[in-house]
Amino acid sequence: MPVLNVNDDVERVSGAEPEPLPAVKSVSRRPRVFPVCANPRCTSSWLQLWRNRRVPVVEGGWLCSPACTRARTEDLLRREYAEARPATPHRHRVPIGLVLLRQGWIRQEHLKDALEAQRRGSRLRVGEWLVANRGLSEMQLTQALGLQWGCPIFSLEQHASALPVTLIPRLITESFGFVPLRISPLGRVYMAFEDRIDHSLALAVERMTGFDAVQGLLPTSEFAVAQRKHAESRFSRARLIEAGSADLLAEAFALHIEKEKPTEARLVRVHDLLWLRLWRYAERSDASGTLGTAQGNGIGDVIGSITSFS
Ligand SMILES: [Zn+2]
């Protein structure tokens, strides 16, 4: 019998004021409240099942049966595709050549030469061409990109003493070209890019890790060092699932959850990839909801990709 859902999954109709709750005189004699299945359409006799299984738990909600795990996974996938993503602003950015001109770091004729090189099919972007051919320094280009994107410039000296290599699976960092540099004591994860930032990606990292993401740029040569250092580190294993449809991916994720029986799992979409993370122990570390991160132990990642075989 479906019981009041304790997992905060209940959709609340906006506009309706909640009824004030009656004052509770004493909770001591109330019977223990059993968790209820997190699948809103569950029809199982959950009490009996609760005696047999305490896991899996997905996004804080216990699932009573493989069928409910499957239904919940489908709901989460649907949510990930339905949610609007923050758009990374492209339209309002000032062209890099103009930023460089305004700063007085190049002259008008340098920009003309760079644009002419583009027209002739140069594979270098305007800024890269100016660094290669007109004496623009790498740091000036990075500073101009920082002005263009409105983001800070990082340095390896400040940040990369201990790269948090198991925070984000390599498949995600390499697919989207960034390096997680550091986790600060204040719970911020510094994400370094070479020539742009990515708000949608940062949001996905925040939702998965519980850390606040700070995005910034590293000068090209430092970025290459950070990338190499990151690639050479030991990663926890991530499994890749390629599925022909969202339904098949939901099925594969649900089977994986049923096999691993996590004490917590979360799902986020990162552009065209679905990132499922499973925790096998209760690792909630503090009130901020930050889950165990970089230990590798007890954490498993699955990356899902929907391919079309048409
Ligand atoms: Zn159920």
Image (cartoon, rainbow, N blue to C red):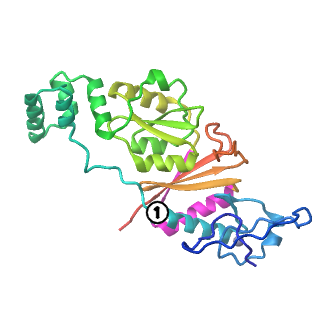
Across and down, in percent, residue 96 comes to 22, 37
When asked about the image quadrant of residue 34, the answer is: bottom right
Residue at image mark 1: 83
- Please state which of residues 109 and 270 is positioned toward the viewer in this rendering: 109
Magenta stretch?
238-260
Going 47% across and 44% down the picture, which residue do you hit?
171
Q: Main secondary structure of the magenta part?
A: helix
Q: Residues within 10 Å of mark 1 (few under 14, many from 20)?
A: few
Query: Which of the four quarters of the rendered structure image does ligand 1 lie in?
Result: bottom right
Residue 124 visible (yes or no): no
Image quadrant in which the N terminus is located: bottom right
When asked about the image quadrant of residue 244, the answer is: bottom left
Q: Is residue 289 above or below residue 182?
A: below
Q: Residue furthest right?
A: 29
Looking at the rendered structure, the number of numbered marks drawn on it comes to 1
State left or right for residue 12 relative to residue 54. left
SS at badge 1? loop
Residue 51 belongs to the span the image colors magenta: no
Hey, what amino acid is under mark 1?
A: Glu
Across and down, in percent, residue 122 comes to 15, 37
Going 88% across and 67% down the picture, which residue do you hit?
31
State left or right for residue 235 relative to residue 5. left
Image quadrant in which the C terminus is located: bottom left
